[in-house]
Amino acid sequence: MTSRERILAAIDRQPVDRVPTDIWATDEVWSMLRAHFGSEAQTRKALHIDGFADVRPAYIGPPLPDMPQDAGLDFRVFYSIWGADLKWMNYDTGRYLEQSTIPLADAVSIADLESFRWPNPDWFDYAGFREVARRAHEQQAVMCGYMAPLFIHNLLRGMEQSLMDPLADPDFTHELLRRICDFEYERHRRAFEAAGEFIDIAQVTDDLGSQNGPLFSIDIYRRFYKPHHQRFIALCREFNIRVFHHDDGAMRTFLPDLVDMGIDVLNPVQRTCPDMDPAALKRDFGSRICFHGGIENQRILPFGTPDDVRAEVRHCIDAMASDDTGYILAPCHNIQSLTPAENIVAMYDEAWNYGKR
């Protein structure tokens, strides 16, 4: 099977010749891997990584504000269109881009929302996008789109205030989310209209869980965020695009609703969090969704031995590919800069060998 065929078969829970793989990693990890293997392409080839081609319409809007140029254009565009700034912060574990301004931190009324400079779907090049997606489609499964109402709510209001908004001012929150999601809906519709036949999967996503439990009640989710997720999922279905749902932490409370709405892939399966046992998730939801991620990257990948990593790979494959499909092996979120190269090699080598069961 080709990488594209393998990824799509796993998502559709069809037979695969081996468990497909993907990689998420920080820039520092990629620098280490390029130094080790020679280039990103050589890294992916040596580690037998299937992965996705992540494509999007080019930005053609107003000039971007001054931001760290080494942040990457796509990352800068994502934050700048909402009026947020970024800066590099150095920690003991590496260098990370952090949001440094909160655009709607002081908003208190719907009038404040009306005076905000909202992004415009016209700021993106849909005409040129079709050829970009077509070329990517020849080699890999193609991912396009990132629809995340809660994430952008957090970006605009700050984490603490955005979690208080639904309780403190429901009308304001509904209007804020409507404006966010109307923009995201329209720009994704235009992208799908331009290149939908070459797009395999899109993200309808949000982090609903923390390390220890849900960020808020299922009632808050159903009142404020679920209708927008449902609308985005319906848009994907209109263009026969599969739905990838990234959701960190202990988020099982929300999973029945998400599966019923039609997500196809759950990432990252943070299995050490409460109620996130992968075997139980496979038992309860594996006939309807594919799992992506799972390899523990808070302790095992950065601090374990290569043998620990290999055991982790076998554990995840046994749990989430127990029927020999429906699982894409990947780290549980980005591989961090403290992770030794030999542990990364061990992960993908074990996936290559053990995943052929």
Image (cartoon, rainbow, N blue to C red):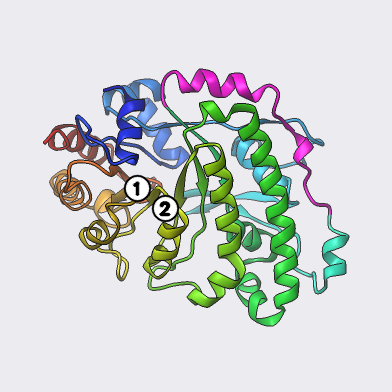
Side (left or right) of 225 relative to 127: left
The image position of residue 92, as x and y in percent, is 43, 55
Identify the element where label 2 is drawn. loop
Q: Is residue 97 in view?
A: no
Q: Which residues are magenta?
A: 117-140
Q: Which mark is residue 103?
A: none
- Count of residue discs: 2
Q: Position of residue 155 (x, y in %)?
A: 65, 59
Horizontal and vertical percent position of residue 216: 51, 75
Name the residue type under label 2. Thr
Query: Distance from label 2 to label 1 (Cα)?
Result: 6 Å
Please name the residue shown 79% across and 43% down the image: 120
Q: Position of residue 242 (x, y in %)?
A: 46, 41
Badge 1 amino acid: Leu
Dividing the picture into quadrants, the one containing residue 19 is top left
In this view, the residue farthest toward the front is 238
Residue closest to the eye, 179 or 168: 179
Residue with the mark numbered 1: 338
The residue that appears at 30% across and 69% down in the rendered structure is: 275
Residue 125 highlighted magenta (yes or no): yes
Residue occupying the point 79% across, 70% down: 106
- Residue tagged by mark 2? 93
- Looking at the image, which is closer to me, 249 or 149? 149
Identify the mark nearer the N-term, 2 or 1. Answer: 2
